[in-house]
Amino acid sequence: MSEDPAAAASRRIDTDPDPADCADLLAAAFAREPAVSWICGGAHAARSRWFHATLHTHAGLAGARRTALVDTDGRLLAAAVLTPPGGTPSAGARALWAARTLLSSGPRALGRTLRYLDATEGGAPAGAWTLEFIGVRPDLTGRGAGRTLLDHVLTTPGAVHLTTADPANVPLYRHFDFTTLGETPLGPLTITSMARVPS
């Protein structure tokens, strides 16, 4: 479906959206995403709690970025979460995240998240930002909101790295000049690591 020019004109980029609003949007956007489904199961409430715990920790990470596409009323249409090169939470922040995730989402979600992080650790090129999440409000899928936000995200200086467990995403990211770095099996998932390195 093509983008309505009037709708496009009424959108703007917000470089400091509320983490809780981003978590709500991403929980809806990732309803059928294989990795989040494997981690959280199929229930929206479980995804929501997991995203809230994760983005709460991410918001305290030095240099971390949340970016959203919003309408004229400030409602989120799409959201992206980036981690700076070498950015990792402190030991204390990781412990708090683990406790929040365990209490809100349960041991399965915590264990599977840790397995996913372990499987994907160290895959980013040196100096690359990591695109942790990008998602679009489900009723806007295919209407240009994701493309608009990703175009903005890719103005970040330097390389951008991501992982995806959804095979349908691979050709999409290739269209944006990402190249495949490798694939990692994890349970029922195949995780593809990709990077976009400016020439």
Image (cartoon, helix red, strand yellow):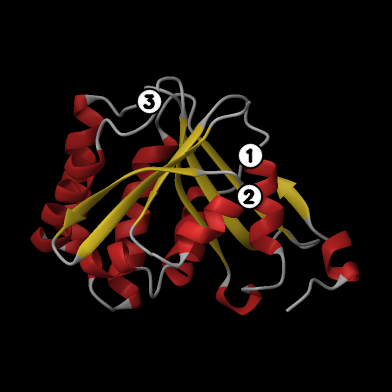
Mark drawn on residue 150: 2
Residue 9, image x and y in percent?
88, 60
What is the three-letter code of the residue carrying label 3?
Answer: Gly
What is the three-letter code of the residue carrying label 2?
Answer: Leu
Q: Residues within 10 Å of mark 2 (few under 14, many from 20)?
A: many
Residue 54 placement, left or right of 199: left
- Mark closest to the chain's N terminus, 1 or 3: 3
Q: Which residue is mark 1?
A: 154
In the image shown, does 178 or 18 lie closer to the viewer? 178
Residue 13, image x and y in percent?
73, 47
Q: Which residue is mark 3?
A: 87
State the quadrant of the N terminus.
bottom right
Query: Which residue is found at the position 61% from the left and 60% from the top?
Result: 78
Structural distance between the alpha carbons of marks 1 and 2: 6 Å
Q: Quadrant of residue 155?
A: top right
Asked if the residue under mark 2 is in contact with the one under mark 1, i.e. CB atoms within 8 Å, the reply is yes
Judged by depth in the image, the label closer to the viewer, 3 or 2, is 2
Does residue 21 appear anywhere in the picture? no
Structural distance between the alpha carbons of marks 1 and 3: 18 Å
Residue 5 placement, left or right of 35: right
Query: Which residue is found at the position 25% from the left and 59% from the top?
Result: 190
Q: Residues within 10 Å of mark 1 (few under 14, many from 20)?
A: some
State the quadrant of the C terminus.
top right
